[in-house]
Image (spheres, helix red, strand yellow):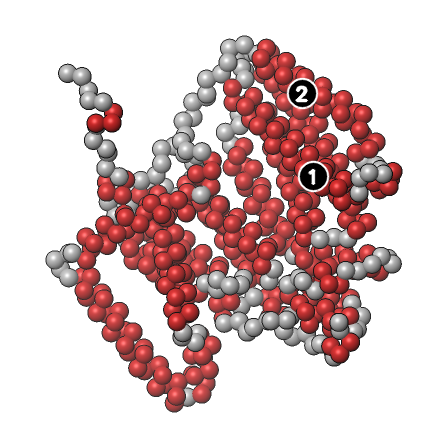
């Protein structure tokens, strides 16, 4: 008997209806959500981000272990490495006050945390692996809802007893804490420092953060309860003949070689080239070189990845041909990376250092690191590890940048230019965060020092202890002069 048409076949049940919810997930995710609601300062960097990350990590690890009943868990040292990188990025909120920098750190932490949960490569794309936790957090909503419904319907009434216990504890706190605070000033000071002022906005923020953090923890547990199939270790099917790869790669190598040979003096000419070019400003030259590098890098990486995956390598001659062509292509691209860095550095020395220009340099350095990884991949002609290695180097570069304190580096470099007789854009300096306060306070003369620091610290509000930040705390100890002469 013939099978019915595909459109008439019954749909398989969703994953959330098939995968059972381990009993440890609800309390673990709920406690992580409570910790996030109480600790996470959503409007600024602070120590609460690290504490919330630790709470989510602990919840996922405990829930995963308890759900396996003594069986080996899915989390390994590789997962721990990615988790450590994610927590290190969140820890930058404790040290640095720069909001743009911390936004990048949070994005990097989300990617590293997803890879920590995923572990080995899945059959899905690397984009899914990078965003697995946010994706699974959305998919886990019906899973958690079904589990919570079954838990509330249990005949032993455990859900009702837990709710009564929580309400009783909350009632006791609401009665005794105000009484004790009114009886002792020292205890009242501690309570005021720990408990924020309650308002509708505070309650809305707590509920929103609780929902997000709980979903993140539940999404990680959802993935671990039924992980995606792992990528096959079998080598992909390759073409039989190498001519269709050798000729294009050879032509590309020749083009790169001729370009580098003809433009070598120009590429490393720096200021002289900029001054000799009549119809091109130094800014256009630097930006043009950067976007050219981006295009060349992306296209070259795509070509190299395709060749490593599908080009024939069955014979010794095939492997030698790949190593020579792809290695030469990668080496020539590294020359372009070096030339772009040289141009950007020359441009910054002439026109000043900014956040955007620093990020351009870091991005170019990362491009160079990726091509070094490509050269390493050519040793064994395997590229399966390249995407994650590239992501890891990007997250590590971001972490190093945060540790080095980029705004302080920019302020120092611009003050060095000013000491050499070049103009100083003090208005741009005043738009920075509290990270620049120590160097500005030490190096700028009055009254410019007070003018810049007044604008840097303008609008600064006291931190609750979850929002404590080293840079902001140190900046508040700096004394300012009279701002009478400030414009």
Q: Within the image, what quadrant is residue 178 found in?
A: bottom left
242 horizontally vs 210: left or right: right
Label 1, label 2: how far apart the Cα atoms are: 20 Å
Q: Nearer the viewer, residue 57 or 337?
A: 337
- For the question of whether residue 376 can be seen, the reply is no
Residue 474, horizontal then vertical, whole percent: 63, 70
How many marks the image carries: the answer is: 2
Label 2, secondary structure: give it. helix
Please tell me whether residue 69 is drawn above or below residue 327 in the rendered image.
below
Q: Looking at the picture, does residue 437 appear above or below residue 316?
A: below
Give the image quarter of residue 369.
Answer: top right
Image quadrant holding the N terminus, namely top left
Asked if disc 1 and disc 2 are in contact, CB closer than 8 Å, the reply is no
Determine the residue positioned at 32% across, 77% down. 173
User: Is 146 located above or below residue 368 in the figure?
Assistant: below
In the rendered image, residue 302, in percent from the top left (x then y), is placed at 57, 28
Task: Tell me the residue that label 1 is attached to.
Answer: 290
For label 1, the SS is helix
Q: Quadrant of the C terminus?
A: bottom right
Identify the residue shown where x is 31% and y is 43%. 225
Q: Is residue 236 left or right of residue 475?
A: left
Circle 2 Cα neighbour tier, 10 Å, few/some/many (<14 / 14–19 / ≥20): some
The answer to which of 73 and 229 lies nearer the viewer is 229
**Mark 1 or 2, nearer chain start:** 2
Residues 402 and 285: in front is 285
**Residue at (69% x, 30% y) in the render:** 333
Q: Please indicate whether residue 106 sits to the left or right of residue 195 in the image.
A: right
Q: Which numbered tag is attached to residue 252?
A: 2
Q: Position of residue 323 (x, y in %)?
A: 62, 20
Q: Residue at x 64, y 33 (%)?
A: 295
Report if residue 305 is visible in the image. Answer: yes
On residue 305, the disc is none
């Amino acid at each position: 008997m013939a099978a019915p048409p595909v459109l008439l076949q019954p749909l398989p049940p969703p994953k959330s209806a098939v995968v059972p919810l381990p009993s440890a997930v609800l309390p673990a995710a709920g406690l992580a959500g409570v910790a996030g609601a109480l600790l996470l300062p959503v409007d600024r960097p602070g120590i609460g981000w690290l504490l919330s990350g630790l709470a989510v990590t602990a919840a996922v690890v405990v829930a995963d272990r308890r759900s396996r009943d003594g069986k080996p868990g899915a989390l390994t040292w590789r997962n721990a490495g990615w988790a450590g990188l994610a927590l290190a990025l969140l820890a930058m909120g404790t040290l640095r006050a720069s909001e743009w920098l911390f936004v990048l750190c949070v994005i990097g932490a989300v990617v590293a945390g997803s890879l920590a949960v995923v572990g080995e490569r899945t059959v899905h794309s690397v984009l899914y692996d990078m965003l697995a936790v946010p994706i699974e957090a959305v998919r886990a909503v019906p899973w958690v809802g079904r589990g919570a419904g079954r838990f509330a319907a249990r005949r032993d009434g455990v859900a009702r007893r837990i709710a009564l216990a929580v309400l009783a504890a909350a009632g006791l706190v609401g009665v005794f804490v105000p009484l004790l605070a009114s009886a002792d000033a020292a205890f009242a000071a501690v309570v005021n420092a720990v408990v924020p002022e309650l308002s509708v906005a505070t309650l809305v923020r707590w509920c929103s953060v609780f929902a997000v953090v709980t979903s993140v923890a539940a999404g990680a547990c959802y993935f671990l309860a039924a992980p995606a199939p792992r990528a096959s270790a079998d080598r992909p099917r390759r073409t039989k003949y190498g001519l269709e790869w050798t000729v294009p790669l050879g032509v590309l190598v020749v083009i790169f070689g001729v370009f580098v040979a003809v433009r070598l003096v120009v590429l490393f000419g720096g200021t002289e080239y900029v001054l000799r070019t009549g119809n091109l400003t130094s800014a256009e030259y630097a930006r043009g070189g950067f976007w050219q590098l981006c295009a060349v890098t992306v296209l070259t990486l795509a070509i190299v990845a395709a060749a490593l995956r599908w080009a024939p390598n069955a014979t010794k001659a095939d492997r030698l041909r790949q190593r020579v062509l792809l290695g030469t292509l990668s080496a020539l691209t590294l020359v372009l990376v070096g030339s772009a860095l040289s141009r950007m550095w020359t441009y910054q020395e002439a026109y000043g250092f900014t956040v955007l220009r620093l990020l351009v340099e870091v991005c170019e350095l990362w491009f160079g690191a990726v091509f070094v990884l490509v050269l390493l991949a050519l040793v064994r002609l395997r590229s399966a590890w390249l995407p994650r290695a590239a992501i890891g180097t990007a997250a590590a570069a971001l972490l190093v940048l945060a540790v080095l304190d980029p705004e302080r580096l920019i302020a120092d470099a611009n003050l060095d230019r000013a000491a050499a007789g070049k103009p100083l854009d003090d208005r741009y300096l005043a738009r920075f965060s509290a990270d620049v306060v120590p160097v500005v306070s030490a190096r700028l003369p009055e009254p410019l020092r007070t003018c810049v620091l007044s604008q840097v610290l303008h609008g600064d509000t006291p931190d609750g202890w979850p929002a404590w930040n080293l840079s902001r705390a140190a900046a508040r100890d700096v004394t300012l002069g009279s701002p009478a002469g400030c414009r």
